[in-house]
Image (cartoon, helix red, strand yellow):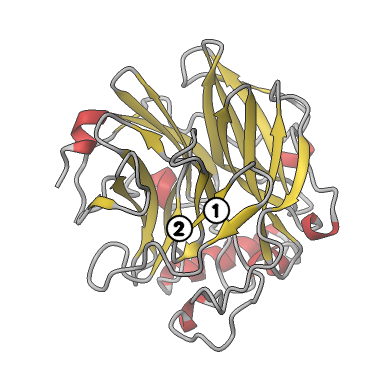
């Protein structure tokens, strides 16, 4: 089911939770990544004892050995962020860096945007789609075991936005979403117009049969825009798939991978505590350590614990594509592949 294209770093996991840093004692995962000024920069999701997500920052000279900042790069401030800010993606357009992230209020996820000139001071733009209607968009967010029930959709739910790094046909573009993927465009990177018709849907009997979610921002290659996305099947395995889009028309899908190009295999990718378990963080934070371990064991034995690689950062340097991903919703890892092997995969 999988083309084994990527080679994992021998240093994996490259980032782990730090018991000495209160806001990231429990989990670090799902990092945004960018290469700038001859350094690799990661903005990652971190969770501490309060079970509220913040965005951390780490920097590296070689892409594998990182130094963390002890202070969050971004932390919850707004009411819609009160239960955390999650899963950043980052892109540079002109001289400005744009970070998309998910604001979570304990009930609904909302895609938000911030910008910076130096990646140190970030200015929030707020919600990307304040009038989004998930039901109109043929989307729904429900408990996993009711994944085909469209009656309990959360109306304003939207997340996972990857922005293209340049204008196409005089517009800025974004692919976003989970369950399905959608397109959005903008003339100024401030006001975004979503297109309600799904751009991409799950496929029966493939690795992405139940659920899909956007990966890192699209990557420009000589053959087209490479889009990495997550595909989830009935066994709750998160794998990485890819699309190739026309360089001049992002609506034109030139290719969609029939097989996944990366999947969880290593112990650190299949042993973490994944936050989509029934009850989520609200349930976990009420447990002591013994209760939590019992809960994890029961989830694994009853086959409801997902296996997860979740890639929200990718850097193309020369012909090498380096991805950064959350493994098991617990640690951060990296892997590399030759870009031509991906573009020529079947």
Q: Position of residue 183 (x, y in %)?
A: 47, 56
CB under 8 Å between callouts 1 and 2? yes
Q: Residue furthest front?
A: 170
Q: Position of residue 111 (x, y in %)?
A: 64, 55
In the drawing, does residue 1 fall left or right of residue 335?
A: left
Q: Is residue 123 visible?
A: yes
Q: Is residue 15 visible?
A: no
Q: Is residue 12 above or below residue 176?
A: above
Q: Quadrant of residue 17?
A: top right
Q: Residue at x 66, y 66 (%)?
A: 291
In the drawing, does residue 246 fall left or right of residue 104?
A: left
Distance between the alpha carbons at the discs numbered 1 and 2: 7 Å
Which residue position is annotated with label 1? 160
Q: Position of residue 133 (x, y in %)?
A: 62, 73
**Camera-side residue: 195 or 88?**
195
Q: Quadrant of residue 337?
A: top left
Which residue position is annotated with label 2? 213
Q: Position of residue 259 (x, y in %)?
A: 21, 54
**Camera-side residue: 275 or 124?**
124
Q: Quadrant of residue 231?
A: bottom left
Q: Is residue 60 above or below residue 97?
A: above
Q: Residue at x 42, y 25 (%)?
A: 11
Q: Is residue 220 above or below residue 330?
A: above
Q: Residue at x 28, y 35 (%)?
A: 6
């Amino acid at each position: 089911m999988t083309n084994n294209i990527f080679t994992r770093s021998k240093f994996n996991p490259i980032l782990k939770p730090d018991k000495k840093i209160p806001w990231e004692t429990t989990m670090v995962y799902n990092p945004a990544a960018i290469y700038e000024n001859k350094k690799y920069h990661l903005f990652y999701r971190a969770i501490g004892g309060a079970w509220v997500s913040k965005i951390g920052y780490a920097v590296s000279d070689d892409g594998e050995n990182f130094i963390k900042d002890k202070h969050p790069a971004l932390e919850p401030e707004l009411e819609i962020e009160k239960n955390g800010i999650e899963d950043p993606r980052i892109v540079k357009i002109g001289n400005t860096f744009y970070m998309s992230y998910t604001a979570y209020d304990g009930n609904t996820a909302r895609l938000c945007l911030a910008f910076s000139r130096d990646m140190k001071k970030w200015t929030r733009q707020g919600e990307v789609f304040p009038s989004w209607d998930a039901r109109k968009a043929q989307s729904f967010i429900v408990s996993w075991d009711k994944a085909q029930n469209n009656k309990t959709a959360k109306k304003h739910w939207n997340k996972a936005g990857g922005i293209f790094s340049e204008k196409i046909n005089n517009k800025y573009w974004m692919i976003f979403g989970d369950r399905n993927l959608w397109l959005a465009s903008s003339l100024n990177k401030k006001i975004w117009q979503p297109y309600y018709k799904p751009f991409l849907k799950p496929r029966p009997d493939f690795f992405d049969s139940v659920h899909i979610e956007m990966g890192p921002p699209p990557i420009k290659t000589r053959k087209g825009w490479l889009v990495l996305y997550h595909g989830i099947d009935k066994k709750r395995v998160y794998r990485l798939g890819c699309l190739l889009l026309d360089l001049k028309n992002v609506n034109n899908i030139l290719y969609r991978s029939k097989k996944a190009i990366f999947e969880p295999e290593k112990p650190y990718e299949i042993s973490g505590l994944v936050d989509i378990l029934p009850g989520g963080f609200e349930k976990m934070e009420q447990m002591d350590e013994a209760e939590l371990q019992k809960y994890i064991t029961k989830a694994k034995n009853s086959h409801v614990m997902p296996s997860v690689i979740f890639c929200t950062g990718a850097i193309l340097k020369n012909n090498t594509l380096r991805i950064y991903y959350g493994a098991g919703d617990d640690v951060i890892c990296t892997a590399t592949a030759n870009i031509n092997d991906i573009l020529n995969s079947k």
